[in-house]
Each structure stands twice: as C-alpha cells, then as structure tokens.
Amino acid sequence: MADALISAVLQQLAAILFQEAQYGRRLVMGVKEEEVQKLDSTLRTIRAVLADAEKRQLKEQAVRLWLERFQNVSFDIEDVLDEWKIAILKLQIARNQRHPSTNSIILSKVSSWIYSPSTYITQSFHRYDIGVKIRKINQRLQIIAREKDDYAFSTVVDQSRKFDSELLERTITTSFIDVSDIHGRDRDINVLLSKEDCWSVFSCLAFSGRNAKDRESLEDIGRNIANKCQGLPLAAKALGGLLRFKSLGDLGNLIHLRGDLEIRGLGNVIEPSEAKKAQLCSKSGLRGLRLKFDPQDIQQMDSQDEYLILEALQPPPHLESLGILSYKGPIAFPNWMTSLTMLKRIQLHNCLNWESLPPMGKLQFLESLEIEVMNNVKKVGEEFLGINTKIAFPVLKKLKFHYMKEWEEWEYGNMLTSRGEKHAAIMPQLHSLTINYCVKLKALPSHLLRNTTLQELHIKGCPVVGARFEKGRGEDWPSISHIPVIQIDDEMLRLDDEDDWLSSGR
C-alpha cells in the first residue's frame, strides 16, 4: 500500500515539475528548488525499504507504527501538491481571460494534471505558503528517514528514475469537461465564486440525478469538497463532474481515493462484473469501507448475485474499518474478510442468511466488533475464534451483540482444551461487553466474566441471562460482582467499594 502511495506522489511531483520546465520558469513562486529536490530524494530513499517494512509490520508493532507515520506524511504531501496544481490552474484561467484566442484549456487526467505547452503562461503566482508547507513536510520526512535505520530494513534499488522521461512525455489526454459548456463564459470564469455559489455549481453537477434524501446525506462532505475549490469555477465544475457517478464501476477511475467510503444500494447492482470494475482492492489510501445492500425491491434480489458482488468488492489489504450491512447472500462471509489483517473495527448488520460468524479471532489488530440482527446464528463457538490461533482477539476492547433472536449458545467447547492444553487467551484485553435483545441466549462464557480487564457489562432484553446475573440472587452474580460498571435492563449498578453498591435508573 505504502509503495503505491509513494509512487502516486512521485508521479504527481514529476508532472508538476515537467510542466514548469516546459515554460522555463517557476510558475508558483515561493517553492524552492532545493526543497523540491530534497523531497524527491527522501521519498525515493524511503521507498527502497518499503517492501521489507510492509512484510515485517504484521509481526513488529514498531514497524507498523513507523509505516503509519510515513503514510500520514504522504497524505499531507498529496494535499500540498493538490494546492500547487490548483495555483497553476488559476494561472491558466487568468491567461485564457487575457488571450481569448488562445486554445481552450486542456486538462489531462486527474492523476497527472499536465497542460498543453501551447497555452503559454507569462505570469507567475506567489504562493509562499506552499513553499513553507513543503519545507515543514521535509523536516518531518527527514525524521522518518532517519528512523528507518533503526530497523535494519533490506533495500530494493529504485529503478523508477530511468522511466521518468517516459512518464513525463506521455500523451496528453482530452478534457473531461465538455468545452461547449464553458464557451461564452470567459467573462465569468476569472471571477472567484463565493462559498455558496461554488457549492451550487459543485452540487448541481455532483448530485445530478440523486434523490432528496441522498442529497441531504451527502451535503456535509460535498461542501467540504467544494470549499477545497477555493472559489475557482473551473475546479468546482471539474470536481463536480468527476463525482457524478453513473455506475458502481466508475469508482475504478478514482485511483487516489482515500479515507472512508460508503457504498449504498448494492442490492440494486444487476451485474457482479460492474462491482469488479470498481477495483476497490487497488485503492491503497482507503481506510474505512461500509457496504450496504439495501435494494429498492427486496423481492427481486438474487442472493447468489449479492455474494458475487461482495466478493468482487474486495478492499485493499490495509483497510482499518469494515461494515457489511443488509447482506442477503447465501455464504457466511466473503473469502477476503480474514485476509484484512489490519482491521481495527468491524460492523456486521442484518446479514440474515449467515448461520455462523467469521473467524475474526485471527485479526490481531481488531479493537471493536459490533454484530447485529443475525437471525440464523444459533451458536457462537470455535469457528468464531479461528483455527490454530494461540490468542484469539488479542487486542479486542469493545464487543457488542444486538438482536440475535435465535442465538442460544456461546461457548468454545473443545477449543479450550484441544490437544490436552488450554487455549492461551481469548479476548485478553476486553474492556466493554454489550448484549441486547438476544432473548434465547442461555449463558455467557465464564472465561470472559473472569477477565480482570472487563470494566463494563451491559445486558438488555435477555431474560435468561439477565436472571442469572440478578444482583445478590442470580446464580452467576458472584462471577460478575468484580466488574466496576454493570447495567442490566436499564438498571445501572456501580461499584463504589467492596460492600456498597448504588443502584439507579438510567
């Protein structure tokens, strides 16, 4: 993932420098040549050890944290390069206004933003803040580069430099904007828009064809994107048009997509091949993913197609947060799920056909797990932990079960005593356990209740379990009396000292 990210950054940097070289001058003043060269050199130095670092991060937490720091800096570099490109774009717009006979602005693909040399620029743009940001990023990057020596990474020789000239000489593509839409607006295009007007232009294009509910839910993130356009009409128009998806497959064009992504209405996707075109596994900057299968007509759903769609939407390996909602597929879970070894948070909601839970105990960085409305799950057992796992859920801190109406048993049986020895640990760092409306559940695993790290226990709408833990009278009350915070059916119990319990309604 990190290697793909650094490749994208180096490509953007090379594209900007090539464009400025075409005009024989610095288009954006304030960016010092030595700082740019230092940035390029340091990135390539770090790139040489990334292959080894990514292999070792699964076993060495210090390496994983080093990689995370580097990735955070890389994202900041991308943001600064975006500002640099926007500043150059503003010069293009200004030049077009002064020389209306000049060829129309030609935009390349978003990944490169290289412009035609026929659009000559005679003016420079003062953006000293960009230079300051690059200098500060270099300082952070130098620290990370020095830290890499502490881990004795093996290196790979960077062969990318010899391809730079080929990269920069690639064919310039045509604009993704319909030039006819701009014709006749030369007077307006040089005028910076107000925030509200910029939002109006952006939303008109980006949310075209969406219903009122979708527009409302997307407004906050849409306004944030519109503000990034800094009042530039062409930037608002370009980004708005880019985000006007016609199909799920259009996600495949967003090669620099990062952060969190939620895809709704997956139950309406007719062809699984369309989901495959999204190429989510290649979105190396993606950190959170929510997949919601909420079809308009539940009667017309094909559960087998839903399974194929879910398989096709395989996320990148460094995903940290995953949600699967309203999934009606026939298979218990996608094949790729347990390969996402960096997952920290999982939400599984309303997966009605699942009869067992995925072996999520294998996920060594999982901290929060929420499972809701699994109507066919009757038992949670060994399959939940994962085979041959010495420590199941090693860092899990929060665990929630909601509305599991058929769930009866939660126990691990032979897993605890397999091969004549007890399991090393199950959820050794669990801090909070919540179980709501699991009406048939008979008992909780004794090993969880004995766990000294458990600080909160919340139970509601579970008549059998609730009776067993009734304060002072339930047969299992002694096993939970050490837990500082206990809430059973809205009755909050807090431990002030060994003999004094206070009870109050929530």
Image (cartoon, grey):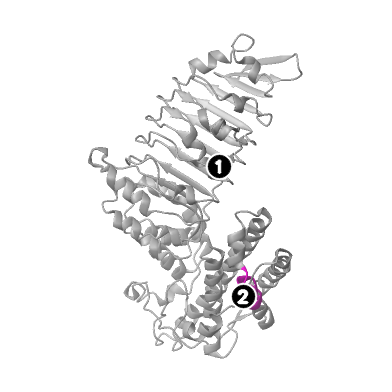
Is residue 46 shown in magenta?
Answer: yes
Q: Amino acid at mark 1?
A: Thr
Q: Residue at x 47, y 36 (%)?
A: 383
Decide which of 195, 139 is in the foreground and name it: 139
The image shows residue 207 at horizontal and vertical percentages of 37, 55
The image shows residue 466 at horizontal and vertical percentages of 54, 16
Q: Amino acid at mark 2?
A: Arg
Q: Residue at x 47, y 80 (%)?
A: 114
Using the image, determine if residue 406 lies above or below residue 66. Answer: above
User: Is 72 situated left or right of 175 in this image?
Assistant: right
Q: Is residue 412 visible?
A: no
Please provide the residue range marked out in magenta. Answer: 39-49
Using the image, determine if residue 489 lies above or below residue 220. Answer: above
Q: Secondary structure at mark 2?
A: helix
Using the image, determine if residue 233 lies above or below residue 126. Answer: above
User: Is 288 situated left or right of 26 in this image?
Assistant: left
According to the picture, the residue beneath numbered tag 1 turns out to be 389
Q: Nearer the viewer, mark 2 or mark 1?
A: 1
User: Which quadrant holds residue 107?
Assistant: bottom left
According to the picture, the residue beneath numbered tag 2 turns out to be 44
Q: Secondary structure at mark 1?
A: loop
The image shows residue 487 at horizontal and vertical percentages of 60, 21
User: Which quadrant holds residue 489?
Assistant: top right
Decide which of 463, 111 is in the foreground and name it: 463
Question: Furthest-top residue in view?
Answer: 473
